[in-house]
Amino acid sequence: MKKKTKKNEKEFELEGLNCSNCALKIEDQVKKLDGMEKVELNFATSTLKVAAEDAKLEKIKEELQKISDRIEPGVKVRDKSEPKADNQAEKSSLKSYLWQKKNIFIGALFFAFALSFSHLNVFNNTIFSSLALPAYITAYFLIGYPVLKAAFFNIGQGQIFDENFLMVIATLGAFGIREYPEAVAVMLFYMVGELFQERAVNNSRRSIKDLMDIKAESANLIKDEKIIEIKPEKLKIGDLIAVKAGEKIPVDGEIVSGETALETSALTGEALPKDVAEGDQVLSGMINLNKLITVRVTKEYKDSTVKKILELVENASSKKAPTEQFISKFARYYTPFVVLTAALVALLPPLFTGAAFSQWFYRALIFLVVSCPCALVVSIPLGFFGGIGLASKNGILVKGGNYLEALNELDTIVFDKTGTITEGNFKVTEVNIHSNYSRQQILKIAAEVEQFSNHPIAQSIVAAADDYTKHSAESDYQEISGAGIKAVLDNNHILAGNERLMQKNNIDFKKVKSTGTAIYLAKNGEFLASIVISDQLKADAESTVSALKAFGIDNLSILTGDNNSTAAEVASQLGLDNFYAELLPDQKVEKVEELLSKSKKLAFVGDGINDAPVLARSDLGIAMGGLGSDAAIEAADVVLMTDEPSKIVTALKIAAKTKKLVWQNIIMALSIKAVVMILSIFGMASMWAAVFADVGVALMAVFNVMRILKTEDI
């Protein structure tokens, strides 16, 4: 039997990757390498993930560098597991940028000289006029060398239809019809536009990274009464760390000394600081605002909250939205189609009408330049990634562009009740007495019975009692599953539970009609009282339902294991359309499957722990209060990092804003290109207009993306 070889993953950073079309080609070429199990290139973060056997991974970096050199010269492949020198990428990028700018500047000077030699009368009929063509050629090669190199290299690799090839054919064609100034000017405009686009893309990436600037770069380890500064990755469970005022907490932990206020906005989007003291849990990424605290590490960095969030956001772009997938496919066919059209524009009119070939050849060259798909391929992934970054800034983790787009298509939302639209904190709301005991005496007896249980209802009764006797754990105590508690305390036989417990012990009790969970109390066979425990609606639950209906989501329901009367009361208070009560976990899944068949897109909102099967089964799983919860992050497609239902409305607004931005870019790019193409056929567009329709529109699209990143009010 053939032994299976273990597959591992590696992640690389492609420093200097600024061409989105090139990114698609690099990804395609890497997929063709022998032994690749998974290849995902994230243009928004310039990262490439590959999965293969260990033997293949050992040599993959060299192969990646070769592929990158062929497709986009200047890209440097770096293994992300290797340490990175401070500011190395920034310095390298800046040097490359300045060097390119220097060549363009020198080339522009030669271009200016060439124009002078050609057009200024003072140089006519002198030796200077014969230098015009060499000056144009020198300027052309100085300015366009990167484009020429990439184009001819790619042609050798069989990759013809890219922006480099189109620019070379268009400008060489201009040389061929003796339009020397225009050939050089177009290349100059193109390269300047590319440099601006590169800076804009980098600024956009930097803005996204700034939104996710939640990782502490160092930690203060307390060892032998000294403080040692180390990387968070080196901390171990049980280590003690000092977190000074103004510092980020590097890993999840528990405060062992000190008290302070923490800024949690980077994780939850909440502006109000959170007060913490000894014994409180703290999460990585929170910022210490006031005083020094000592924290015991409870999770290593790889398992900490900040690491999970960063991985989720970085991996989100690998799950592409349908719009993004469509544009990627569209770009593959769009450019060859326009090249073919350009050939027909150059050949057919001269062939059938006898028009001048040079005239129609020039118009065909404009077609070639216009056909570059950069504006589309650059702005769409950046648009979705910008939306994901903005959501994260507001305490919402969206696992992919596909889920962000799916938020726009919801017509049905189903809520879990407890802990989702209610607080999940039970309180005693009624005490109905049917004996000579006072309210406090009733609560005292009930608390003495319930003190041994960890159930939330039992704890709420204990919390409501002002005073009660604390009995030992060895007391005669029996918890009856699905019924309640039977105990013998001070020789008194006490029963505390539901109707079933009363009926089983032949207690003559009075049934409660109030909404909530009723606990019936009996002593020595005598019915004493009923205690009603109710859950409270969350403060923003009603406003959330109203806002969702305003969004056009008309089918809003709750699924709960609670009784019918409680579910009906909650549904009525919130104005929900339906409720489904007294459901076991498997019955919840069945009910969701039934609702799925009647819905266009269904989202289930739950706590992410007990509702994991339903979250996974729905079209879109939204986990409430999932911060730090492994189950929530694993099961859900969208994680709301606070317990506020209103975050769903925020997520819908961000999704709508992102969709609007993406389609604005698509329509703008295609419209401008179409107009320039039509005008070029009638001889009403120049090569300058064509370059603007390529690089200029791409630049406008990237700036459009940056607008969403600066949005403050959602």
Image: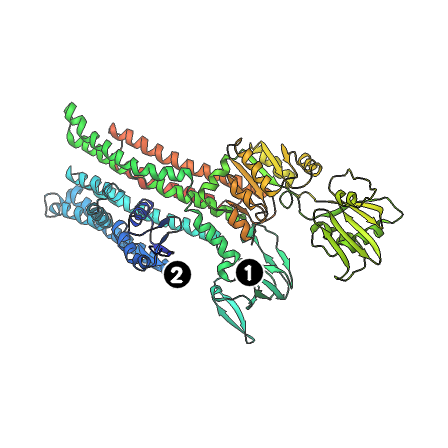
Q: Residue furthest front?
A: 1
Which image quadrant is residue 366 in? top left
In this rendered view, identify the residue nearer to me: 602 or 398.
Answer: 602
Residue 702, percent across and down?
39, 43
Which quadrant holds the N terminus? bottom left
Among the two numbered marks 2 and 1 on one chain, the one whose residue lies closer to the N terminus? 2
In this rendered view, identify the residue nearer to me: 579 or 574.
Answer: 579
Q: Amino acid at mark 2?
A: Ser
Q: Is residue 182 left or right of residue 209?
A: left
In this rendered view, identify the residue nearer to me: 539 or 685.
Answer: 539
Residue located at (26% from left, 31% from top): 680
Residue 692 at least partly seen:
no
Q: Which mark is residue 693?
A: none
Residue 170, percent across and down?
21, 39
Q: Is residue 463 left or right of residue 133?
A: right
Residue located at (33% from left, 36% from top): 330
In this rendered view, identify the residue nearer to me: 94 or 518.
Answer: 518
Badge count: 2
Residue 511, percent across and down?
79, 39
Categorize mark 1 by other alpha carbons within 10 Å: few (<14), some (14-19), many (20+).
many
Q: Amino acid at mark 1?
A: Asp
Q: Are marks 2 and 1 in contact (CB under 8 Å)?
A: no
Which residue is label 2 attached to? Answer: 81
Q: Is residue 141 left or right of residue 202?
A: left
Spatial CA span between label 2 and label 1 = 22 Å
Q: Residue furthest right?
A: 436
Residue 459, percent across and down?
72, 53
Q: Secondary structure at mark 2?
A: loop
Q: Secondary structure at mark 1?
A: loop
Q: Which mark is residue 252?
A: 1
